[in-house]
Amino acid sequence: MLFNSRALASVLLLISGADAFKPANSNNSNKATQLKKDLANIVAVGVVSAATLLPFAAPAVAAGDSLVMGTPLETKLANFGAASYPVFNSITDVSPLADKFVDFLEKKVKAPDAADVATKAVDGLLAIPNDSINEYKGVLKQVVYSGVNKDSCVTLGGSGAAAKKLASSAAIKSVDPAKIDALTKKFQPANSAVPTKGGDICLPGSVTASEKLWVAQAELTFSMPKTEATALVASIKKAGAQATRPSLLTLVPTAESVFSKNAEALKMVAAGKDVEPNVIATYSAALK
């Protein structure tokens, strides 16, 4: 289960981050400066966690013409794909971040609310048109992983263990097994196009391939029908309100240990900060 486990994990990540980016009122300049630094760290955690655990930046919906292709969002997603490429290639083990995230989720978010998000996420993923999944498969096979050999590829270290950890979380295990089975079957065509080695997923073979991956993932996400996307967003908002800034900051040390704080990692974080407002604006407009 490559796609659906990571997709569910992405939605659960949004629970913890949903409240983190609300502006805070303060007349104290020192507090304001510290808050700015704290928020920068939170954004970093959100970006690197999302980039590692999921193929989605946010839940959204498409209606008619593409909300990604030919827009500023496409360019910014491609930039993130380029900036993240060398960082992902240097990771030896991402699983500690998954462990920390699951522990955070289960301690900070009420179980019924986390379970509701997971169920709404499954419902939304199941509602994505099969044509969109087949198109995504084509991009993976013909562009993203073209020329990538599963026996000699560079893998995202620890991604297999991370996926298992997330799949075994209480929130995801609470979902009706029949729906999980249906989701596995639905995304099997796309999953089959993602090579793995030693249980870990292979990374795209080039910077350009990484750029195309992030754009294609957004295209797929934005094909979620409005009804299911609206329900998912509402569920995320409710659960996300339970995560405070101080609690989110506890994820920072683990994220930094996985991704380091070198120039390439900082460039990836900057690209993530740059794309986030466009993602939020796009799905917010689509849900109106």
Image (cartoon, rainbow, N blue to C red):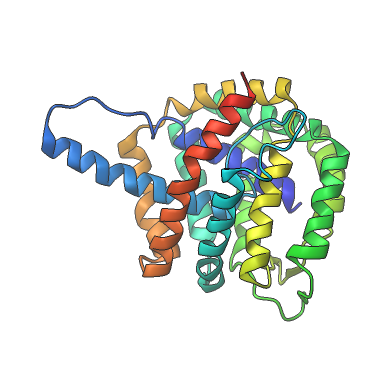
Outermost front residue: 70
Q: Quadrant of the C terminus?
A: top right
Q: What is the x, y in percent for residue 169?
A: 60, 42
Q: Is residue 246 visible?
A: yes
Say which residue appears at 79% left-offset and 34% top-offset.
Answer: 128
Residue under the point 65% across and 49% down: 55
**Is residue 287 rendered to the left or right of residue 252?**
right
Pick the front one: 203 or 222: 222
Residue at position x 79%, y 75% from top? 147
Q: Is residue 14 left or right of residue 270?
A: right
Residue 202 vertical position relative to residue 39 in the rendered view, above or below: below
Q: How many marks?
A: 0
Who is closer to the viewer here, 143 or 196? Answer: 143
Residue 176 is situated, as x and y percent measured from the top left of the image, at 76, 30
**Residue in the image at 87% along x and 39% along y:** 130
174 vs 90: above or below: above
Is the residue 212 above or below the residue 227 in the image? below
Q: Splitting the image into 4 quarters, where does residue 121 fall?
A: top right
Q: Nearer the viewer, residue 69 or 217?
A: 69
Q: Is residue 93 above or below residue 242?
A: below
Residue 265: percent from the left, percent from the top? 42, 64
Q: Is residue 1 left or right of residue 113?
A: right
Where residue 271 sits in the image (x, y, percent)?
46, 54
Res. 169 in view: no
